[in-house]
Image: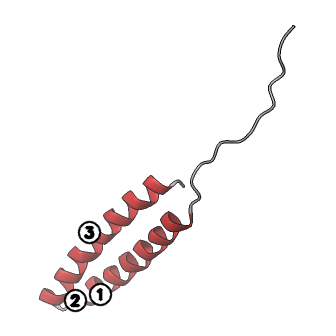
Amino acid sequence: MNRSVALRAFLIFTTITAFAAITGILSQAAIAEATFLIGASLAAIMLFLATAARRPEAVPVRVRARR
């Protein structure tokens, strides 16, 4: 998983978590609280993966000249 995919997934899970939190506050349903906790934990994992991913670096390759 590269950095852009992890950040995109983080934003999606953050949005879902915010909606679940709003629903949980308004309805006081147990399932909304569970959805909030699951979404928050997945968002935290995606944010960790986004920060832990290394940036691509150029790999030195020896090229032989043709004669």
Tell me the amino acid under the disc marked 1: Glu
Badge 1, how many Cα within 10 Å: few under 14, some, many 20+?
A: some
Badge 3, how many Cα within 10 Å: few under 14, some, many 20+?
A: some
Circle 1 residue: 33
**Which residue occupies 36% across, 75% down?**
39
As drawn, is 51 to the left or to the right of 16? Answer: right
Tell me the amino acid under the disc marked 3: Thr
Instruction: Give residue 42's position: percent from left, percent from top.
Output: 43, 73
> Foreground mark, 3 or 2?
3
As drawn, is 31 to the left or to the right of 2? Answer: left
Query: Residues at badges 1 and 2 in contact (C-beta under 8 Å)?
Result: yes
Tell me the amino acid under the disc marked 2: Ala
Query: Residues at badges 3 and 2 in contact (C-beta under 8 Å)?
Result: no
Circle 2 residue: 29
**Which residue occupies 26% across, 68% down?**
15
The residue positioned farthest toward the left in the image shown: 26
Query: Residues at badges 3 and 1 in contact (C-beta under 8 Å)?
Result: no
Q: Between residue 13 and residue 54, name the one nearer to us.
A: 54
Q: Quadrant of the N terminus?
A: bottom right
In the structure shown, which secondary structural element does the residue marked by tag 1 occupy?
helix
In the structure shown, which secondary structural element does the residue marked by tag 3 occupy?
helix
Instruction: Give residue 29's position: percent from left, percent from top.
Output: 22, 89
